[in-house]
Image (cartoon, rainbow, N blue to C red):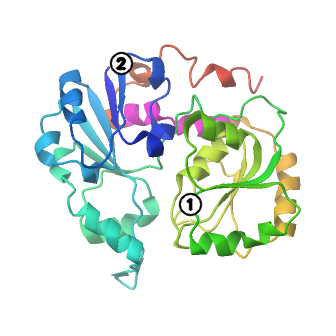
Amino acid sequence: MRIAVVGARTWFANHYPEGWQHDPDVLCLDVFEGDYSWLMVLRNWRPDVTLFYRPELYPARYLDRVPGQRIAFLTEPLPAIRDGRMQMTAESALRLKVYEGMAWHAYHRCIYYDAGRAETVRHLGWPITAYHPLPLDTAQFHPGEPGAERPVDVCFVGKATPHRIEVLDFLRSASLRFLWVAHGVSGPHLATLFRRSRIVLNVHADGVAAQEPRLYLAAACGCRVVTEPLSTAAMGFPGRISQIATPWNEGMMRAVLREAASTPWTWQDEQDRKAMGVRRLLAEQTGLPLGAWQDPTLHEDGEAVAGLLA
């Protein structure tokens, strides 16, 4: 099976198929808006299935020429519905404007990343066929060796917004080892950062509840995740992802640190991690056996976790 993935590496390297770097049957195209020359490469490669991230950016006249199954994975947040009306912000209005160019008919399946926005999707009349959080490259995102040092107490990865600055301001005067990375870290570097962190925070950019990829990327690396309330229940990792309303404070973070210190990686954590795999998602969406999508160079989800639970 030939797998192709279309999506800017800066944002989606965490969500490429396991082992993509050394698998000749996987093609990951690093793309950016405004240059569609990569579509000729994709067409000539003749994939069996192509996973498109940011599918709203690609013109139908090109997509129709790409062979095989085409799966759209929509990742832009949508506004919530309240009293029958969408709760619009400046950001959500811009995102909906971008979605106006979505070539729905050019895709065989359309997945949206946040089941908590199903009502909004119905209101918009979108032909979404499934809901699923952004899948993970589970060969990279794993907890590592048991007992390995985690020198960072609290970590946050995401751009600075007024809401995030307000929520995280208490950490400036807290005696905690805190790290905030605004941008520029992904793939193995992000996985390493999370494996060196004890708590990873999730703060919504504009304070509007949503599902966020960092929840699962961090949980898969064995972190304790503290998040603002979500739009819907988290997918898996019930012992690692905690929804706690703000305002937060140092005392609460220290309590979470103590609890995290006594929470080992479990068999269920490992099953939840594997369930988030990119290749597993493709197997589910195409209806083919999982074995058809396995990376032959890896033992299940990666040698790095072999024997982890032994």
Residue 36 x %, y %: 21, 41
Residue 206 x %, y %: 52, 72
Residues in magenta, as a range: 269-284
Q: Nearer the viewer, residue 203 or 224?
A: 203
Asked whether the viewer can see residue 50, the reply is yes
Identify the residue shown where x is 83% and y is 44%: 151
Identify the residue shown where x is 63% and y is 67%: 228
Is 241 colored magenta in this rendering?
no
- Prevailing SS of the magenta stretch: helix
User: Looking at this rendering, what residue extends furthest in the bottom direction?
Assistant: 83
Look at label 1 and name its amino acid.
Answer: Lys
Q: Residues within 10 Å of mark 1 (few under 14, many from 20)?
A: few
* Numbered mark located on residue 159 in the image: 1
Quadrant in the rendering for residue 39: top left
Q: Quadrant of the N terminus?
A: top left
Quadrant in the rendering for residue 241: bottom right
Q: Taking 296 as reference, is 125 above or below it?
A: below
Residue 224 x %, y %: 74, 51
Residue on which the image places disc 2? 25
Identify the residue shown where x is 84% and y is 37%: 149
Find out whether the residues at labels 2 and 1 contact each other: C-beta distance under 8 Å: no
Is 274 colored magenta in this rendering?
yes
* Numbered mark located on residue 147 in the image: none
Element at badge 1? loop
